[in-house]
Amino acid sequence: MLTSDLVRTTIRGEHVEPLYLDTDAFKAREKAELLTTIFESYRDEPRGDIEEQVQAVVGHGTDYKIWRGLAKLLDDRSEFETVAEVEPQRIRREAFERAAERDMAVEGWRDEVVEEVAGALEIDTEAVEAGLYADLDARQRLVEYEPIEPQALLHRYNLALAQAVLYDATHLEIELGETDPNMLRYLFQALKFNRLMHRVQRIDDGYRLIVDGPASLFERNRKYGTHMATFLPALVLADDWHLRAELDWEDEAREFHLSDDEGLVSHYEAQGQWKADEEERFEEKFASTETDWTLERRGTILELDDNNVIIPDYILEHPDGREVYLEIVGFWRLSYLKRRIDLLVEREDMPLILAVSDRLSAGQKELEESPAEVFFFKTVILVDKVLEAAAAATEDAD
C-alpha cells in the first residue's frame, strides 16, 4: 500500500481523481526497471545500501513522490532481517565491557577488544564486526524479495493510488453488468472474505453492490479501510463495472468514480476461494465432528424479495432433506444486522444462520428475540453452536 504522503490526487469540482502514471511512458518504464534491478541484485545486502541506490534513482525532482511510491511498493515485497552469528545485543555488551577497561589513547585498543570478544563468543573477528550493529534498520539484510516485472510495477502503482482513495470512503455503490457466474461468486467471496458490510440487489442488466465504508462505523477503523482497499483488485478483474464512492476527504464531502474504462490492471487471479482464518478452523472442526449434517462451501446466489440478493458462505444438508444456509458476519452495526434479518424474515422457506463476530458487541441483547438464528463468536466458530442453530432454524421453518 502507499502511505498518505505518497498519494497523488487532484480535486475537480466535487471529485477526487488519482494522478495515474502513463504506464507506456519511457521515463516511467526506465525508472521502474532501475528500481526493480536494485532490489533483485541486492539480495543479502544491507537495507542502507539499497536505500542509497534507491535515492540515487529517485532524486529530489518534482516527480519524487512517483518514484518513491514505486520504491515503497518494492519495499512491501521485501523482507529484511537481522543477520548475525550471535545476537548483536550480546556482542555489544561484551565489547562495551571490555572497552570500558581500555585506555583509548593507546593505539590498537579496538582491535584487541574485537579479538577478545571473538574468543569469548567463539566466533571470528569478522563476525564480531558484522554483528555489532546488525540489528539497526540500515544494517538489516534483504533476505526475501518477491520479484515483479517493471511494467507490472507501474500497473501496481496505479491500482495502489485508487486503493489509497478508498481509505476515506464512507459509502460505495458498485454496478456490475452481465457477468460470468463464476466471476460473480469470486467477487461475492472477496466481499465476504474482507468482511465488508454489503447489500446486493438485482438490477435490469446485472447487480448493484452497496458497501458501507470505514468512516461509517462508530469510529474510523483503519483495518476496515484496508479491507476495502484489498477488495478493489478483485473488482478490477471483472469486465463491466462502475464504482462510485462517497468520501470524507480532508473533512470535505467528495466523490470518487472508477470503472473498467480506466484500464487498471489487477495483480489478483480469479481462481480458488477466499477463505478467512476462522472459516478454515471451522471447516477443520466440522470435518472432525460426528454429525449427520454435511457442510459445503457453495456460494449460492439467493434471490430475495424486492430484487435483493444474499450469498451465504455455506450450506448445511441433512440426510432427511433439510437444508440450512450459514453466513459469517465480521464487521457489523446493529442496523446492518437488522436489515439482514428483515430480508430473511420474508423468506420463511430459506432457513439461515448468522454467525456474528463479537468484536463489535453493541446491540447483541436487542437481537436475542430475532426470528433468524443468530449467535456470536470470538475467534472460533463453534460447531456445536452451528448444529444447534441449524436444528432450531429447520424446526422454525417447519
Image: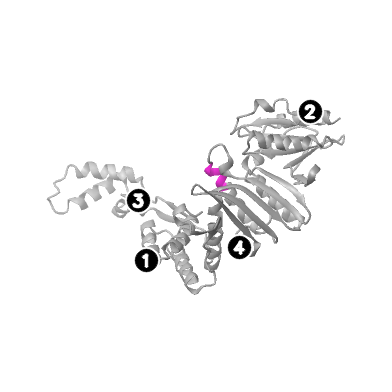
Disc 1 element: helix
- The x and y percentages for residue 82 are 40, 50
In this figure, which residue is indicated by the disc labeled 4? 265
Disc 2 element: helix
Q: Quadrant of residue 67?
A: bottom left
Which numbered circle lies on residue 56? Answer: 1
Disc 3 element: loop
Cβ atoms at labels 3 and 2 below 8 Å apart: no
- The x and y percentages for residue 120 are 28, 44
Q: Residues within 10 Å of mark 1 (few under 14, many from 20)?
A: few
The quadrant the C terminus occupies is: top right
The kind of residue on which mark 4 rests is: Val
Task: Please identify, in this view, whether the residue under mark 3 or under mark 2 is nearer the observer.
Answer: 2
In this figure, which residue is indicated by the disc labeled 3? 134
Pointer 1 or 2: first along the chain: 1
Pointer 2 or 4: first along the chain: 4
Cβ atoms at labels 3 and 4 below 8 Å apart: no
